[in-house]
Image (spheres, rainbow, N blue to C red):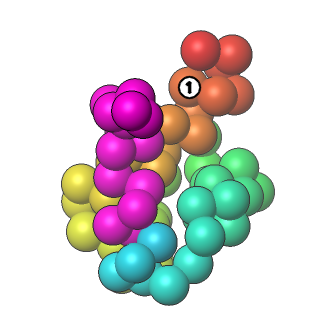
């Protein structure tokens, strides 16, 4: 039986389905942004790319944690 995905990554299937882009593409957008603070990035994804708050927050949290090596 597959392990249940927890945390921000649990949002990834619905993000891909709703917005039609792979997670790798969203994460690259976050990494390439000149913004660095969590809530600035969330606001940017919401305003510029139409993501909902929960989806934007999950992408930013996961991407920033990866950058920190977590």
Image coordinates of residue 14 in percent, x first then y, are 33, 67
Q: Which of the image's four quarters has the N terminus?
A: top left
Rendered residue at 32%/59% (across/down): 55
The dominant secondary structure in magenta is helix
Q: Does 29 sit above or below residue 10?
A: below
- Magenta range is 1-15
Dot 1 lies on which element?
A: helix
Rendered residue at 69%/16% (across/down): 69
Identity of the residue furthest to the front in this view: 1
Rendered residue at 33%/52% (across/down): 11
Image coordinates of residue 68 in percent, x first then y, are 66, 18
Rendered residue at 63%/54% (across/down): 27
Q: Quadrant of residue 9?
A: top left
Residue 38 lies left or right of residue 68; in this view the side is left
Image coordinates of residue 15 in percent, x first then y, are 39, 67
Q: Which residue is mark 1?
A: 65
Q: Nearer the viewer, residue 15 or 34?
A: 15
Q: Is residue 37 visible?
A: no
């Amino acid at each position: 039986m597959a392990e249940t995905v927890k945390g921000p990554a649990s949002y990834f299937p619905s993000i891909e389905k709703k917005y039609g882009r792979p997670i790798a593409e969203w994460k690259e957008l976050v990494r390439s942004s000149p913004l660095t603070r969590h809530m600035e990035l969330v606001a940017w994804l919401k305003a510029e790319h139409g993501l909902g708050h929960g989806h934007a927050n999950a992408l930013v949290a996961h991407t920033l944690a990866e950058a920190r090596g977590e």
